[in-house]
Amino acid sequence: MREEIIRGALTMVWAMIGTLGIALIFNVEKRVIGWVLLASFLCCVAYDTAMALGGGLFIASLIGSSVTTLYSYVMARVIKTPVTVMIIPGIIILVPGGMLYYTMLGAVSSDMAMFSKYGKEALLVASGLALGIIAVTAISRPINALLNRVLRDNKSRT
């Protein structure tokens, strides 16, 4: 149990370092970097929790990207920054780069077992990421339009 906690904490630290690197590469404003790191942290926690509960790669990726996207939509509105500035670095830790590498290695070396195993896993993670972002975006647009209308009506009354 103690080893799992240490491994999880180290995973979080490496995820934050990776997210910080991506944020710096993408020239994220300094005032936003802390919020982006929190998005990455929430993504990691949601993903790890879903995996610990037996959700599998697709469900864990779906939940991780959904939580991050929801947080990003709320915080982008609060700190007045584009949503993509929060989402992209926030979910970058879930992108299946290693799985894609081993998929290609299996294809190049004619190892069909490796190719199919890692290809399936990469497809599940990528599908979960995409579906999580799409689902939250589809839900948030009508809510955002309603909020804008309410705020506009309140301004016109004053």
Image: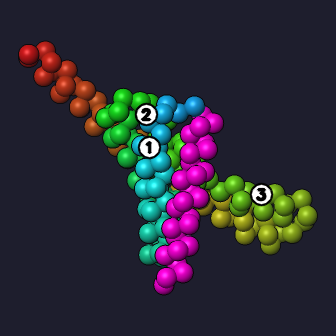
Q: Residue furthest bottom?
A: 1
Q: Residue at x 23, y 31 (%)?
A: 147
Measured as percent of width and height from the top left, residue 139 is found at 34, 43
Residue 109 at least partly seen:
yes
- The colour scheme of the drawn protein is rainbow
Look at the image and give the residue range highlighted in magenta. Answer: 1-26
Q: Secondary structure at mark 2?
A: helix
Report the disc number at residue 34: 1
Q: How many marks?
A: 3
* Disc 1 crowd, CA 10 A, few/some/many (<14, 14-19, 20+): few
Q: Secondary structure at mark 1?
A: helix
Q: Amino acid at mark 1?
A: Gly
Residues marked 2 and 3 touching at CB (< 8 Å): no
Q: Amino acid at mark 2?
A: Arg
Determine which residue is flagged by label 3. Answer: 101
Q: Residue at x 38, y 35 (%)?
A: 76
- Compare residues 63 and 91 and report the one nearer the observer: 91
Give the Cα separation between the discs numbered 2 and 1.
7 Å
Q: Amino acid at mark 3?
A: Tyr
- Compare residues 56 and 52 and report the one nearer the observer: 52
In the image, residue 11 lies in the stretch drawn in magenta: yes
Determine which residue is flagged by label 2. Answer: 31
- Compare residues 126 and 22 and report the one nearer the observer: 22
Magenta part, dominant SS? helix
